[in-house]
Amino acid sequence: MRRSSTEAVLQNAIKLVTSMERSLFQVIQNPKLKLDEIETKKLQCLRTFIAQIGSLWNIAMVQEYALLLEMYTKDFMPTLHNS
């Protein structure tokens, strides 16, 4: 039973990351948005992602998400780390 709950958490993690990537890709590909609007939209996506993470009960998974989020922001949103 433990294994199936872990698998369910991992499946949810994959869905969350996939959803976030899709949302951010749509934001970045929108030629009508100015750079500051793109940054705002990225932050909105990240806030949603963090809120979804917070609903998880598994601390280890939350820690994994935090690492993924940190890596993502360093690679794709360097302005957050340079301020």
Image: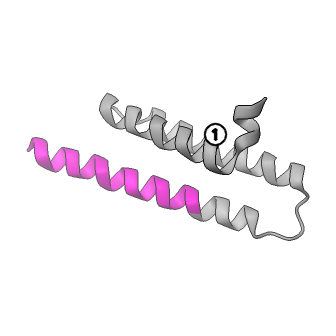
- Position of the N terminus, as image quadrant, is top left
Above or below, 56 against 44 in this view is above
Amino acid type shown at disc 1 = Arg
Residue pointed to by mark 1: 47
Q: Nearer the viewer, residue 51 or 82?
A: 82
Q: Residue 26 location in percent, x, y?
A: 69, 67
Above or below, 62 against 49 in this view is above
User: Going 46% across and 53% down the picture, which residue do you hit?
Assistant: 16
Q: Residue 33 location in percent, x, y?
A: 88, 62
SS class, disc 1? helix
Of helix, strand and loop, which mostly describes the magenta segment? helix
User: Going 42% across and 58% down the picture, which residue do you hit?
Assistant: 15
Q: Is residue 58 visible?
A: no
User: Going 15% across and 50% down the picture, which residue do you hit?
Assistant: 4
**Drawn side of residue 2 relative to residue 44, left or right:** left
Q: Which residue is situated farthest in the left direction here?
A: 1
Q: Is residue 16 visible?
A: yes
Q: Residue 25 location in percent, x, y?
A: 66, 65
Above or below, 42 against 70 in this view is below
Q: Residue 72 location in percent, x, y?
A: 57, 47
**Drawn side of residue 2 relative to residue 51, left or right:** left
Q: Determine if the magenta segment contains residue 7.
A: yes
User: Going 71% across and 50% down the picture, which residue do you hit?
Assistant: 42
Above or below, 70 against 31 in this view is above
Range of magenta residues? 1-21
